[in-house]
Amino acid sequence: MIGEQNTLLSNLLAGTVQVAPAGLEAKQLWDASGQGTVHVKSSSIRLFEPQWSPALQMEPTLLDPRVRRAFYHSLDREALAEVLVGSRDRAAWAILEEDDPLFPAVKDGLRQFTYDLTRARALLSEVGWVAAGDSSWRHSSDGRPFRSSIWGTPGRDQEMHLYGSYIRALGIDVEEYMTPPTRYRDPEARSQFPGWDFTGTNLTKMMTDAAASAANNWTGNINRYESPPARRLVDALETTVVADRQAQAMKAISDFVVAELPALPVFFLVQYTAVQKGVKAFDDLTGSDGSERAYGGYARNAYVWDLQ
């Protein structure tokens, strides 16, 4: 098992690994060299998520949706998508991708949160933050500076640094903490982050899961999010097979996300899987109907992979 992305990339380039999950860098290198093929498939959505536990959140006003909107306006999602997944088109302007059957119900739901530092600063002012002469922020109630934190995961240093740079441009002092691999594998430890975390997951799953705790063996949301209204909205979607009702339910979920911002959808992730030249694999990658959403994972026919 190779758990570190840079080590995995080195092994792919050296030829000691022939088939493996990869990343954008591997695709760019192999597209140029012809050493192999990196297949691309839609995956999940990247969420930039706050710590929801008041006992852990280092800045209480982050629990006010106006402050989360300010953070959202400070992120250039198109630029982030271009750098991190290779295409500005992967930016999340809705909670679903365009090829999802329910996309028309949520289209452009997140379009109002454009990259706009002026709007972001105005929202912070609404919550009592006052701009200081050095472009930082202090709260009118007690003069405290606006400080936050981002916890990153192993191999995602660049992404964490990019988020940090955008937040600093807003005038907020932000600490970047790279979670050690041993701590990352411990959900209880990961759930202790005091500011922001980022993850690739299913948004509706996050809305239905309970907050991670000792009671559920830390299997719930590590951001401690838990919302009965959100759960009811997703239940309404998952308990009907009538197309019109599904669309209405998904629209209600989108409206809830826009209003509350339980997490900030940034861009849609893609799954890269590399196969070295000379290896026969992934001939049926898109499935019999030619759709990226065909049933089954990459390894569904691994028993027929072979050397050519």
Image (tube, helix red, strand yellow):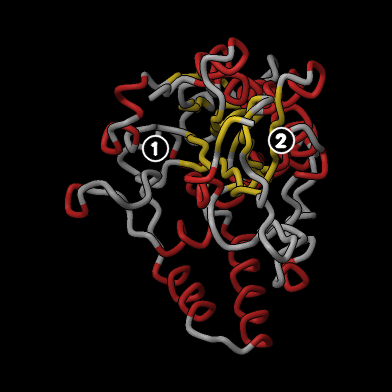
Q: Quadrant where the C terminus lies? A: top right
Residue drawn at x 49%, y 35% is 196
- Depth check: 55 or 25 in front? 25
Location of mark 2 (residue): 74
Residue drawn at x 65%, y 81% is 248
Q: Amino acid at mark 1?
A: Gln
Q: Earlier in the sequence, mark 2 or mark 1?
A: 1
Location of mark 1 (residue): 57
> How far across and down, in percent of the image, does residue 70 sit?
66, 42
Secondary structure at numbered mark 2: loop
Left-right relation of 16 to 121: left
Q: Amino acid at mark 2?
A: Ser
Q: Is residue 302 above or below residue 178?
A: below
Q: Is residue 69 visible?
A: yes
* Corner quadrant of residue 67: top right
Q: Is residue 302 above or below residue 22?
A: below
The alpha-carbon separation of the residues under discs 2 and 1 comes to 20 Å
> How far across and down, in percent of the image, does residue 1 sit?
38, 25
* Corner quadrant of residue 253: bottom right
